[in-house]
Image (cartoon, helix red, strand yellow):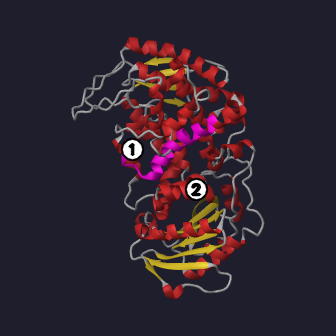
Amino acid sequence: MKETLNPAPSQESTSSIATRPRRTDAFTAVVLLAGLLLAAPISFAQKPSTPETKPETHITPEQGKELFRSVDELIKFASEDTGLPVKHQVKRTLTTRVAVEKYLTDKFNDDEDAKRMQRGEIVLKKFGLLDRDFNLKPFMLSLLKEQIAGYYDSKTKTVYMLDWIDPETQKQVLVHELTHALQDQHTDLEKWGDQTPADVSHNATEDNEHLAKDEMDTARTAALEGQAMAVFLDYSLKPSGRSIIKNPEILDEMQNQAAGDDSPILARAPLLLSESLLFPYKDGLSFEQDVWMDKGREAAFAGVLDRPPASSWEVMNPRAYEASKQSPLLVLPDIHGLLNNRYRAYDVGQVGQLDLRILAQIFGGEGAARELTPAWDGGIYWAGQLLSAKTPEEQGSTKSIALMYLSAWKNNASAQVFAHMYAEDLGRKYSGVKLAKEEVSSAPGRGDEIIYNTNEGPVVITVRGKFVFVSESFDLTTARQLTDLLIDGQGTGEIRTAAYHPADANLSASWVRFLHSCGIMKSALPR
C-alpha cells in the first residue's frame, strides 16, 4: 500500500469553501441531500455569509495520518453496504490545490472525452444547447476548480484527498470515492467505463454502429455514481439508524431542497452543463434505490456492474431496465451519397431521453420537460461541415454546420407540441428568422411542413404522424430528400431497439463522462 502525505503548503488567501467530490448532472441535486441533515447533520464548510474571506487552512501532518488510517475503516463500510469485496488495499494520497489544478488542466487537454466535448461544442451551439458566444474551455476549468472535492483515479488505483478540506468533511467524500475503488476491483473501470469510439463515422454501416452504442457511457456513469451516492447517504445516515432502503422517502425529501449559494460558477453554467453534472448523481441514485428495493443488494451493486444499463432511458426508467427492455433506437439510412459532395461527416449520435429533457427545459421550460420527456420514443441527429469551410475561423462557425434531427414520439399530439416548441426557439439561435410562407408544402403525404429563412440558411420542420424531422442549413431540395429518407427509413413496424453494445457519445455523453472522471463535485453532496 502506498501512502503519500504532502506537507501542507503555506496558506493562500482564498475563500474557505469545502470543495467536495464530483460527479454530474444538472439540477443542483446536491441540494437533494440537504434532507439528510434532518437526521444526521454533516458538517460541511459553508461559504461565509459576510463578504470577508478567510485564509485557507490546510490539514496538518498529524491530521493527514489520521485521515489515511480512516481509509481502511471507510472501505470496510462501503464493502458491507454494497456486498462488493475488498480484494486489496487502496493507495491513498493527500494532494495540494496547485497539484489538483494541474491535474484538471492536463486532463482537459488530454482526455478523450474532453476532446470530444470540445469538438462537439459547435454542434451543441447549432442545436441551441449552448449560446453562440459561450467559451467552453475556460468556463469548464473554472467550474472544475470550484467543484472538485476529491477523486479516485482508476489508472493509478489511488484515492486522492485534498489538503485544504478538513478531515471530518473528507470522510464523507472518501466513502463515496472508495465505493469507486470497490467497483474498480470488481470490474476494471478502465476497460468497462469508456467504450466510445473516438473516430467519426463515414458510411451508413459506421453511422448505425455508432448509434447502436451511443448512450452506454452515459448510463454506465450514472450506475457508478448512483451506487457511490447510495453508500455516501447510508454512511451519513448511519448515526440516526436510517438508510435509503429503510427510509426511501429520504430521496423525495432531498428532491425538494433548494440549491446552496456557495457555487457561483455552477450557478452561471448553461443548463446542458449543469444537467450533465448532476444526472449521474441524481438520476443514478434514484435508479440504484429502485433496483435495490425491487431486486435486492446483489442485483443493485454487483448485478448492475455485471449488466449495466445501456441508455439514459433505462436509468430514468429503472423498471424497464429490470425487465431487460431496451431503449428505442431509430435507423439512419445511407445519406452519404446525397451529401458527400458538399459536406464532410462531423458528428452523429442519439438524442436520448436525457438530451430531450435538457432540450425541452431550454426551449420550453420545466413544464415542457415534464410533459414531453415521458412521451419521447427515440431520436437521432447527424451534422456535416461544409467542404468549403477551410480556415479555422470558418470551421469554428455554426454557419459551416448543417444539422438534421429526427425524433419519434409515443403519440401524434406530442410530436406536434415538440415541433411547435422547437420552431418557437429558432429566434434564439438565429437572426433574421422569417416564415417562408410561399415555401409551405401542400403535397399529399408530405405531412405538416413549415420552412423558415435564417441567417444560416433554411430551417425545415416536418411532422408526419409520430415523427418530427428538423433540417437546419441544408437547401430546401436536400432537406426534403432527407425528410423522406429518414422518416421512410424507419419502416412501418415497431421502432427497433438498441442492441446491448458498448456506447458511443450522444449529445451529453462526453460532458457526463468527462465531469465524472475528474472526481466528485461538491454540488452533488449535502450541505
Q: Is residue 99 visible?
A: yes
Image height of 325 relative to 90, above or below: below
Q: Quadrant of the C terminus?
A: top left
Q: Nearer the viewer, residue 435 or 120?
A: 435
Q: Is residue 69 left or right of residue 163?
A: right
| Residue located beneath label 2 in the image | 373
Q: Which mark is nearer the camera, 2 or 1?
A: 2
| Residue located beneath label 1 in the image | 266
Which amino acid, mark 2? Thr
Which amino acid, mark 1? Leu
Query: Few, some or many C-alpha atoms within 10 Å of disc 2 (few <14, some 14-19, many ≥20)?
Result: many
x then y, percent, for residue 403: 54, 68
Query: Few, some or many C-alpha atoms within 10 Å of disc 1 (few <14, some 14-19, many ≥20)?
Result: many
Q: Secondary structure at mark 2?
A: helix
Q: Nearer the viewer, residue 523 or 257?
A: 257
Span shown in magenta = 266-289
Q: Earlier in the sequence, mark 2 or mark 1?
A: 1
Q: Secondary structure at mark 1?
A: helix
Does the magenta-highlighted stretch encompass residue 56?
A: no
- In the rendered structure, find residue 242 and report the number of the disc placed on it: none
Does the magenta-highlighted stretch encompass residue 267?
A: yes
Q: Residue at x 53, y 29 (%)?
A: 152
x then y, percent, for residue 83: 67, 23
Q: Is residue 389 visible?
A: no
Q: CA distance from mark 2 to mark 1?
A: 24 Å
Q: Residue furthest bottom?
A: 438
